[in-house]
Image (spheres, rainbow, N blue to C red):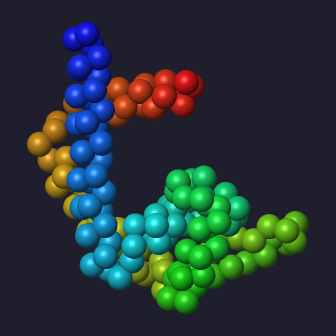
Amino acid sequence: MKLASEELKAVTVLLRTSQAIQEVIRKDVASYGLNPTEFSVLELLYHKGDQPTQLIGKKVLISSSSITYVVDKLEQKNYVKRKGCPKDRRVIYAVLTSKGKALMDEIFPKHENKLKEVFETINVDDLKQMSTFLKQVGYKATSI
C-alpha cells in the first residue's frame, strides 16, 4: 500500500513539474514571437541541420499532421524553407534560412540560460542522476 502511495506522489510531482517547466518554455519562446512547437522545430534544424519533414514530428514529439502547418508558419516568417531531395522526389527537407539561423544564434543562448535558471538549485551530479531515473521510468512505461 505504501509503495503505490509513493508512486502516485511521484507521478503527481513529475506532472506538475513538467507543466511548470513547459510554462517557463512557453513564456520564454513567446517573447521571441514563437510558440513551443515552432521553437522545437527551429531548435532541431539549428542543432541537427536539414531534416526530412516526415521525420520532424517524431523528433519534436508532435503529430505528423501538425508538421505541415508548423513548417508553413515558419516559412511565412522566413525562418525555414522547403527543399526537395535530389535522390528521392517524395522527400522534402525543412531547411533553416539565414534569417532563421540568425534568430537562433541570438535567442538560443538566452533560452539555454532560462533553462539553467530552472535547474540552478540542482547540482550537476543530481541532474544526471535525475535524468537516468526519468529515462528508466520512461523506458518502462513505453514497454507496458
The answer to whether residue 88 shows anywhere in this view is yes
Residue 58 x %, y %: 60, 53
Q: Nearer the viewer, residue 52 or 72?
A: 72
Identify which residue is drawn at 24% across, 45% down.
16
Locate residue 108: give its quadrant. Answer: bottom left
Q: Is residue 131 above or below residue 98?
A: above
Identify which residue is drawn at 28% across, 52% down.
19
- For this view, does 62 lie left or right of residue 90? left
Q: For the N terminus, which image quadrant? A: top left
Residue 115 x %, y %: 25, 56
Q: Is residue 135 above or below residue 20?
A: above
Q: Nearer the viewer, residue 13 or 105?
A: 13
Identify which residue is drawn at 30% across, 62% down.
25
Q: Is residue 2 above or below residue 48?
A: above
The answer to whether residue 105 shows anywhere in this view is no
Residue 54 x %, y %: 70, 62
Q: For the C terminus, which image quadrant? A: top right
